[in-house]
Image (cartoon, rainbow, N blue to C red):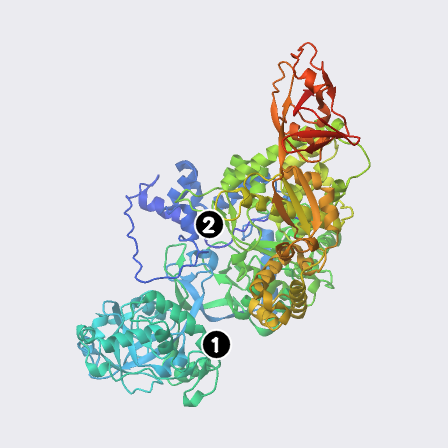
């Protein structure tokens, strides 16, 4: 529609573990339970009790992705059956190939029903099943390795012991995005005499090991916490030392080179925390020569080692727990603790923290009046207050590091302890990670090929590329920058699943986040290689065989300045055709994906483009749009709760256009979009109404006004529609579809243009309407509508009128609604609109100051800064209570209309607008009269409340005399009406008021004939003649003016006044 050629391809990514894992599970289930499988009855899972208050992240669902999709079903066969497959249809899915053949055509079919207009010739599947794409990925990785982007070595990686390989994001059922978390494992030597549980280990060095993220705080250790009822083990390391920790953490250590045999734990003793309570220890860096193990009941087994170092100077939990033990002797006795193990130990000052001093935990606990370790909510809040502030702003006060920032000394202190043998580096997953094979993952040191993301030169290139990428939102850009800051090596190989084999080490497969980073380049030539055959197994349309696609051939296609390969048998004109396709379409103008892929896939996408085309920035991505996930009826989709809707189900339920309209209206930002079924129903009804409205308008075109003379309302409407065209185009360019719907459909009223602007969202109904409009060709071939001139002044006048009318209605409601406050004794009949020529002097001062502050700060500063700026201005002394409310009202108005909110005068004549739309205001407010005055002539309240752009209305009730209006027409359904008449009423006003009494029969004053007695004294005593209803009556003169007396009404015509007996007659034509 913009006059550009567009390429919109759609591929199918099959790489990774999911398909292979599902096929293998089906095979195992048949082997274990027969065919068709007879599964054992399922036992109900026990609900896990939460032992402490957890601050929940509302953006995270309660269920894993797999559990949400499968409805919590345990077996793969059950999952397939729940999808509607019969037993005989499920069995073929034991073969991986069947998955690749069955689902891609189904996906294409559903997308076509949705109205997706993709170039299906370019559609392909990944993995080595597709020989052309397989060759493409092999070429990419050969070049990456040649350019030193791929390395080999042991790396800490999330690892599935059951699968025997690294577990990447797409291989996980829970824990996507979770990486290895580095801890410093503090070695706390157990001092003799050993407790009885360690009696057989007297010849060995025994260490309790505590995992900490804050090694720099070890100077403040006063004790070590263990949980009395938690299970621990003492296990032997490969150097003969013994570590005491939980079995879970020992399992992680076993895969990180701690043990003699990889993955094997040599358990020497099993024990519980109470077995080692009160044990004496020596700890690194602490000022106490001997510290003891003490009880803490809130330690969790799923984090760290179950052994926790205590630093009560800087950790509120530690301080509260230590204070409890000191203050409560029965508590100490319960766990067999002697006084000397607890009472001599006080918090040690080690870090000076702004606002909290050098004992920040003590300070914050006293400030918040925390009484004990049971005040969990308060302790969590206290921790949030001091933890990050201590790390980022704290200054060390211990001698060796005095004056240095905490964050600067963390690594040096860690290295010092590790080099001294007082600590070791230990990793575990940041959160629990479950593989798709239902295995809890660990962090392992793995031999693997990895992409060296984070390497400085490469990262600098990626950062440069990002600077030129449109991310559509600053939040998205910040996420990318943050990822570039922390992202390090990424394992690109695995030994299980589907994919392309590493060219130089074919025991490994290239994992799914690594074979899909520059696939967009393959789109440009896929149609010539595969011709729309998904797996590339059919003959190429240009006669190329997969084995002919050598790395040199790919170089020639994708790189500039590369010589034509002499060894190839592919004709040069054929390769030039492929090269031309690539050069024509590349780079990628737009990449759209989920926000959860910013920390991985989308960042890898930038890195790899920079690596493959390092010297040709013209091939780097131009824009990336990251969107949120989709909620259904405000909740995460889940089959187990029934809150689930597939694409095909949504199309069948709401139609393709109805679904698309609801999706577009569901939300635009990186926040999760909300597809609400009630809104989808309403949207479908809206489309139906739109279609019927179009038909109605087309059927009544001959009744429309044909005058070329435009009224001011016409001009305003024209400008508003032209502005909407411009705005809608901008919304589409920013991918703000909800906003595009608002300005281009919901608030738009020119059928032809409206149909063109709605077409990208609802193509089917728009194609139909386009035909109804008499167009011969398809709407697909039409251009975006051209907007005419926009008169901003007219639009401001319209907005002013709408806003003022709204304010007038609100004030009317306040005056007439029951309740407190000043009320009118009845329904108001008249009103005065007061208009200000200028702002009061004090408001001028405020507006001038706000404008200065805005320009100086490139935006409004905080209200505190604004208040400080205004407080010393003497002209504001009398209005101190009004100043900040006026400031806030101005800022709110600024959000709506921009810098015009700071203007001291309007761009148009307010009185002229009110005068032009006088009749509209009288009608909408149901008044009999309305006059306009300047606030200069009003009282003090009017002068205060009335400002430019904000007229003030005062309602009143004027005296009236009731006149009987009689309809003499037989069988007309019109009756006698008691009609009020006001001073200086005209005939038109009386007719208008009369017409309001029955709009079904009186639609225009020209229909009504208003009459009176020709001789009141004589005719009022005469019996009416229903055969001649106008007998004895005469027309009321056109120029009549009604005047009121104390108890009567007079008619004034040409300066003469006469009574008419307070009776009028009306005949409706």
On screen, residue 162 versus residue 957, left or right, reads: left
Q: In the rendered image of this protein, does residue 936 appear above or below residue 237?
A: above
- Frontmost residue, 1031 versus 230: 1031
The N terminus is located in which quarter? top right
On screen, residue 250 versus residue 137, left or right, reads: left
Residue under the image location 73 percent in, 48 percent down: 911
Q: Earlier in the sequence, mark 2 or mark 1?
A: 2
Q: Which mark is residue 438?
A: none
Mark 2: secondary structure? helix
Q: Identify the residue position indicated by label 2 in the image.
A: 19
Q: Which mark is residue 392?
A: 1
Q: Nearer the viewer, mark 2 or mark 1?
A: 1
**Residue 554 visible somewhere in the drawing:** yes
Mark 1: secondary structure? helix
* Pointer 2 local density, CA inside 10 Å: few below 14, some 14–19, many at least 20: many
- Frontmost residue, 586 versus 989: 989
Query: Dots 2 and 1: beta carbons under 8 Å?
Result: no
* Pointer 1 local density, CA inside 10 Å: few below 14, some 14–19, many at least 20: few
The C terminus is located in which quarter? top right
Q: Position of residue 193 (x, y in %)?
A: 19, 83
- Frontmost residue, 161 versus 586: 586
**Residue 4 visible somewhere in the drawing:** no
On screen, residue 718 versus residue 241, left or right, reads: right
Q: Position of residue 668 (x, y in %)?
A: 58, 51
Q: How many angstroms separate mark 2 from mark 1 (CA)?
A: 45 Å
Q: Position of residue 476 (x, y in %)?
A: 57, 61
């Amino acid at each position: 529609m913009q006059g550009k050629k567009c390429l919109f391809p759609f591929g199918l990514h099959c790489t990774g573990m999911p398909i292979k894992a599902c096929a293998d599970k089906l095979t195992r289930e048949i082997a274990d339970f027969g065919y068709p499988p007879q599964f054992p009855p399922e036992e109900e899972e026990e609900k896990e009790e939460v032992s402490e208050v957890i601050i929940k992240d509302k953006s995270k669902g309660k269920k894993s992705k797999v559990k949400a999709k499968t409805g919590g079903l345990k077996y793969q066969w059950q999952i397939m059956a729940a999808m509607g497959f019969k037993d005989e249809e499920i069995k073929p899915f034991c073969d991986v190939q069947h998955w690749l053949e069955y689902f891609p055509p189904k996906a294409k079919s559903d997308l076509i029903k949705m109205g997706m207009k993709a170039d299906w010739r370019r559609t392909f599947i990944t993995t080595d099943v597709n020989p052309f794409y397989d060759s493409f990925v092999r070429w990419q990785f050969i070049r990456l390795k040649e350019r030193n982007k791929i390395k080999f070595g042991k790396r800490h990686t999330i690892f599935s012991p059951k699968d025997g390989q690294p577990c990447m994001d797409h291989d996980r059922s829970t824990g996507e995005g979770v990486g290895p978390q580095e801890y410093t494992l503090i070695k706390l030597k157990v001092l003799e005499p050993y407790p009885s549980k360690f009696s057989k280990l007297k010849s060995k060095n025994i260490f309790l090991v505590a995992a900490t993220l804050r090694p720099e705080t070890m100077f403040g250790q006063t004790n070590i916490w263990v949980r009395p009822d938690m299970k621990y083990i003492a296990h032997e390391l490969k150097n003969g030392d013994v570590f005491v920790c939980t079995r879970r953490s020992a399992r992680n250590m076993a895969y990180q080179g701690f043990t003699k045999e990889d993955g094997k734990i040599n358990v020497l003793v099993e024990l519980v925390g109470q077995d080692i309570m009160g044990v004496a220890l020596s700890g690194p860096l602490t000022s106490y020569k001997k510290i003891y193990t003490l009880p803490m009941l809130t330690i969790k087994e799923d984090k760290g080692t179950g052994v926790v170092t205590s630093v009560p100077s800087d950790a509120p939990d530690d301080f509260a727990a230590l204070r409890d033990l000191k203050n409560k002797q029965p508590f100490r006795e319960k766990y067999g603790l002697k006084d000397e193990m607890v009472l001599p130990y006080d918090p040690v000052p080690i870090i000076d923290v702004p606002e909290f001093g050098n004992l920040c935990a003590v300070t914050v606990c006293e400030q918040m009046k925390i009484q004990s370790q049971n005040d969990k909510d308060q302790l969590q809040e206290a921790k949030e207050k001091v933890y990050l502030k201590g790390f980022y702003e704290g200054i060390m006060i211990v001698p060796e590091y005095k004056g240095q920032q905490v964050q600067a000394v963390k690594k040096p202190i860690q290295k010092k302890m590790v080099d001294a043998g007082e600590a070791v580096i230990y990793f575990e997953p940041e959160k629990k990670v479950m593989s798709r094979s239902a295995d809890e993952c660990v962090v392992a040191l793995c031999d693997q090929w990895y992409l060296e993301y984070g390497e400085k030169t490469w990262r600098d290139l990626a950062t440069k590329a990002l600077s030129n990428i449109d991310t559509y939102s600053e939040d998205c850009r910040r996420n990318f920058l943050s990822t570039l800051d922390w992202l390090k090596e990424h394992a690109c190989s695995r030994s299980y699943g589907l994919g392309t084999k590493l060219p130089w080490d074919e025991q490994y497969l290239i994992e799914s986040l690594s074979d899909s980073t520059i696939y967009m380049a393959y789109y440009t030539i896929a149609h010539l290689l595969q011709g729309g055959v998904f797996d590339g197994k059919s003959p190429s349309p240009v006669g190329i065989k997969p084995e002919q696609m050598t790395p040199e051939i790919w170089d020639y296609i994708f790189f500039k300045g590369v010589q034509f390969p002499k060894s190839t048998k592919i004709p040069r004109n054929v390769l030039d055709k492929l090269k031309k396709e690539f050069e024509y379409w590349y780079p990628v103008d737009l990449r759209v994906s989920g926000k959860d892929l910013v920390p991985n896939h989308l960042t890898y996408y930038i890195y790899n483009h920079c690596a493959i085309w390092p010297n040709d920035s013209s091939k780097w991505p131009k824009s990336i749009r990251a969107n949120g996930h989709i909620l259904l009826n405000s909740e995460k989709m889940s089959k187990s709760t029934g809150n689930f809707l597939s694409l095909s189900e949504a199309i069948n339920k709401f139609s393709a256009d109805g679904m698309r309209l609801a999706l577009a209206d569901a939300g635009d930002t990186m926040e999760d979009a909300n597809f609400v079924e009630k809104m989808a129903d309403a949207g479908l009804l809206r489309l139906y109404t739109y279609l019927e409205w179009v038909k109605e308008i087309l059927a009544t075109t001959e009744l429309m006004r044909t005058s070329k003379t435009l009224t001011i309302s016409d001009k305003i409407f024209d400008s508003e529609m032209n502005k909407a065209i411009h705005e809608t185009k901008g919304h589409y360019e920013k991918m703000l579809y909800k906003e595009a719907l608002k300005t281009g459909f919901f608030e738009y009223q020119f059928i032809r243009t409206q149909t063109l602007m709605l077409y990208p969202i609802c193509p089917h109904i728009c194609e139909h309407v386009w035909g109804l409009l008499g167009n011969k060709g398809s709407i697909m071939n039409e251009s975006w509508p051209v907007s005419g001139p926009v008169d901003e002044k007219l639009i401001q006048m319209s907005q002013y009128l709408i806003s003022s009318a709204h304010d007038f209605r609100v004030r009317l409601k306040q005056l007439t609604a029951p309740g407190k406050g000043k009320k009118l004794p009845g329904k108001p009949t008249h009103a005065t609109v007061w208009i200000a020529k200028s702002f009061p002097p004090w408001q001028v001062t405020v507006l001038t100051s706000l404008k200065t502050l805005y320009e100086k700060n490139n935006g409004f500063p905080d209200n505190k800064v604004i208040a400080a700026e205004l407080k010393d201005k003497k002209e504001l002394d009398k209005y101190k209570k009004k100043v900040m409310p006026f400031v806030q009202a101005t800022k709110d108005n600024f959000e709506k209309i921009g810098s015009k909110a700071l203007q001291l005068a309007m761009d148009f004549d307010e009185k002229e607008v009110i005068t032009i739309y006088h009749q509209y205001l009288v009608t909408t407010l149901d008044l009999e009269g309305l006059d306009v005055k300047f606030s200069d002539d009003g009282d003090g309240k009017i002068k205060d409340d009335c400002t430019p752009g904000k007229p003030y209305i005062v309602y009143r009730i004027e005296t009236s005399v009731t006149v009987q209006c009689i309809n003499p027409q037989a069988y007309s359904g019109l009756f006698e009406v008691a009609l009020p008449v006001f001073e200086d009423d005209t005939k038109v006003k009386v007719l208008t008021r009369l017409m309001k009494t029955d709009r079904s029969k009186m639609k225009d004053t020209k229909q009504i004939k208003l009459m009176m007695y020709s001789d009141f004294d004589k005719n009022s005593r005469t019996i009416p003649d229903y055969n001649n209803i106008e007998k004895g009556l005469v027309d009321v003169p056109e120029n009549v003016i009604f005047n009121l007396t104390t108890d009567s009404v007079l008619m004034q015509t040409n300066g003469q006044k006469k009574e008419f007996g307070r009776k009028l007659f009306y005949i409706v034509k």
